[in-house]
Image (cartoon, grey):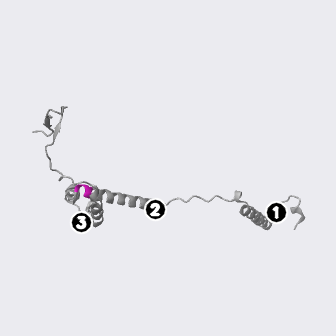
Amino acid sequence: MPANVFRGEIMTSEQKIEFEQRRLAVMRAHVQSDPALRRFRRKRRLSVARSVLGSFIVFGVALLLIKSFIIAFEGPEAYASMVSPLLEGQANDAVLTRALGPDPLSTGIAAAVSPLFPDRPVAGATQAVQVPLTLSLPDEEPALQSLTRP
């Protein structure tokens, strides 16, 4: 080693490289032995593709369940009459036709869920319902008025 290094003079490039390697080795040893000095792990971020794919999956499952509940509640014929105006002019393989049309999975879910709904009258059938609109005493007959217009 030259004597001028110890007097504060500039080191050679080889000496600088050697010094940096020793300094980094000492720092690594200290960091590995002291848990307080360890680097924090970076939080994993979801990729954009994964989040978009997850959104499409959630949307598809929600659409399937909504379609199944409507089929179970209204019936397959009423559901077909509801979506037929939307599907006019669409090809059989169109995305909208596949999404809104009844499929085996949605009809299977509808069949499993249909016992939850009580028997309902046919949709579109209107009946005049007589509802008492005045307060009546127990010995009097209630005055009934029709809610439908003549």
Residue displayed at 72% across by 61% down = 31
Q: Residue at label 3?
A: 92
Name the element at disc 3: loop
Neighbour class for label 1 at 10 Å: few (<14), some, many (≥20)? some
Q: Residue at label 2?
A: 50
Quarter-of-image position of residue 29? bottom right
Q: Position of residue 137 (x, y in %)?
A: 18, 31
> Does the magenta stretch mainly form a helix, a strand or a loop?
helix
Name the element at disc 2: helix
Q: Residue at label 1?
A: 11
Q: Earlier in the sequence, mark 3 or mark 1?
A: 1
Q: Earlier in the sequence, mark 2 or mark 3?
A: 2
Q: Is residue 3 above or below residue 128?
A: below
Q: Is residue 79 above or below residue 138?
A: below
Viewer-nearest of labels 3 and 1? 3
Residue displayed at 82% across by 63% down = 11
Q: Amino acid at mark 3?
A: Asn
- Residue 87 in magenta? no
Q: Position of residue 98 (x, y in %)?
A: 28, 63
